[in-house]
């Protein structure tokens, strides 16, 4: 059974980015997360990560529609 919550390092590995990038995403509120325990360790719920990824797909699709590739002049 998959764990409900992920460490920031797990999220970084899943997204293929650095731990510091994930930390920034969490601290900025871009990626929802919670702090748990006496030391306030960050955890990201797997479902929230999947929602984040789906949102990024939608943002990218919108960007592609708004910024079509220009055709090159025939050489």
Image: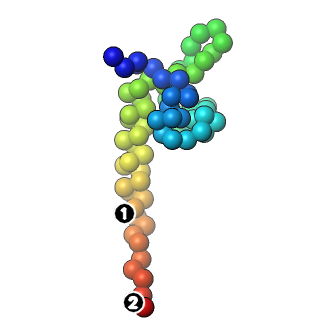
Residue 34: which disc? none
Q: Considering only order in the chain, which callout, 2 or 1, is on the residue closer to the N terminus?
A: 1
The residue lying toward the viewer, choosing from 1 and 39, is: 1
Name the residue: 37% across, 55% down. 61
**Looking at the figure, which quarter contains the C terminus?**
bottom left
Residue 74: which disc? 2
Q: Percent from the top left, x then y, of residue 52?
A: 43, 37
Q: Quadrant of residue 40?
A: top right
Q: Is residue 19 left or right of residue 70?
A: right
Q: Residues within 10 Å of mark 1 (few under 14, many from 20)?
A: few
Name the residue: 53% across, 23% down. 7
Q: CA distance from mark 1 to mark 2?
A: 23 Å
Considering the numbered disc 2 on the image, is that residue within a helix, a strand or a loop?
loop
Residue annotated with mark 1: 65
Q: Percent from the top left, x then y, of residue 34?
A: 53, 20
Mark yes or no: residue 33 visible.
no
Q: Is residue 23 above or below residue 6?
A: below
Looking at the image, the residue that sits furthest to the left is 1
Q: Percent from the top left, x then y, of residue 54?
A: 37, 41
Q: Is residue 43 left or right of residue 54?
A: right
Question: Looking at the image, do the residues carrying marks 1 and 2 touch, with CB atoms under 8 Å apart?
Answer: no
Looking at the image, the residue that sits furthest to the top is 38
Q: Percent from the top left, x then y, of residue 14?
A: 46, 35
Q: Quadrant of residue 46?
A: top left
Q: Residues within 10 Å of mark 2 (few under 14, many from 20)?
A: few
Mark yes or no: residue 32 visible.
yes
The label nearer to you, 1 versus 2, is 2
Considering the numbered disc 1 on the image, is that residue within a helix, a strand or a loop?
helix
């Amino acid at each position: 059974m998959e764990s409900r919550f992920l460490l920031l390092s797990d999220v970084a590995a899943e997204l293929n980015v650095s731990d510091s990038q994930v930390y920034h995403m969490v601290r900025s509120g871009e990626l929802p997360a919670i702090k748990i325990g006496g030391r306030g360790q960050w955890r990201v719920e797997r479902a929230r990560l999947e929602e984040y990824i789906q949102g990024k797909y939608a943002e990218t699709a919108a960007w592609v529609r708004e910024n079509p590739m220009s055709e090159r002049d025939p050489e």
